[in-house]
Amino acid sequence: MKRLFPLLILCVFAFGVLGGCASKSDIVKLPRPSGKIAVAGFTNPVFNWELLAGYLPQEGKPIQQDILQKLDAKMVGVLSKHGVTAFARPAITRQCQEIEVFENLGGRREAAFAYWVKVGQCMSADYILVPQILFWQDLRGMQKADFNIQPASVIIDLFLIDVNNKRIIRRYHYDETQQPLSENVLQA
């Protein structure tokens, strides 16, 4: 019995260690919606009435078109990387965006929502993904020795709209601001 007890303790310890070394479970993958998905190009609402939800930190501050085009390309790349290939790309969706008219249909939010539903219907899509950039600020470093540094910042909303049922299924809100190194140093 004296020889079996240490062996039993060693086995229990070994199973505990091996259990901790097991691969972690993958992220739970939610089922993708079935149907045709259209991805709108990144838009930059300049006024609050162009938004599907939320508000603009600064009205009337447009973003350069080349940034929007780079983000469109990045979005297509990320979707392709994750195995999403059967979707209408932003370049195709943009054609319907130019055809459809943004009409004033009562409330301001309803007009923006109705516009995107019509774009989805024009694409014969079941769902449309609408990315909106609400705020974009590039890093502004020191031009002189005045220590006037403004970190890069971005606020993006992504909306997944069910075109057939005319409702927003999901809203993803990203609000990120770069933290200056001077603030990070003391937290290390």
Image: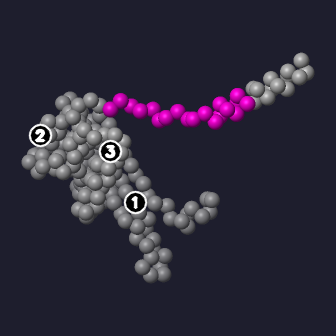
Quarter of the picture holding the C terminus = bottom right
Residue 103, given in percent of the width and then of the height, sits at 11, 46
Q: Residue at x 12, y 40 (%)?
A: 122
Tell me if residue 57 comes above or below residue 145 in the rendering.
Answer: above
Q: Which mark is residue 122?
A: 2
Residue 161, given in percent of the width and then of the height, sits at 25, 37
Q: Which numbered disc flags the more N-terminal residue, 2 or 3?
A: 3
Q: Which of label 2 and label 3 is nearer to you? A: 3
Q: Nearer the viewer, residue 56 or 157?
A: 157
The residue positioned farthest toward the bottom in the image shown: 144
Q: Give the distance between the C-alpha atoms of the residues marked 1 and 2, in whole angstroms.
A: 34 Å
Q: Is residue 137 left or right of residue 45?
A: right
Membership of 20 in magenta stretch: yes
Membership of 170 in magenta stretch: no
Q: Which residue is mark 3?
A: 79
Q: Secondary structure at mark 2?
A: helix
Q: Which of label 1 and label 3 is nearer to you? A: 3
What are the residue bounds of the magenta stretch?
A: 14-32
Q: Which residue is mark 1?
A: 153
Q: Is residue 43 left or right of residue 82?
A: left
Image quarter for residue 9? top right
The three-letter code of the residue at mark 1 reads Ser
Q: Residue at x 49, y 35 (%)?
A: 26
Q: Residues within 10 Å of mark 2 (few under 14, many from 20)?
A: some
Residue 121, given in percent of the width and then of the height, sits at 14, 37
Q: Residue at x 15, y 42 (%)?
A: 119
Identify the coloring: one colour
Q: Does the image show residue 21?
A: yes
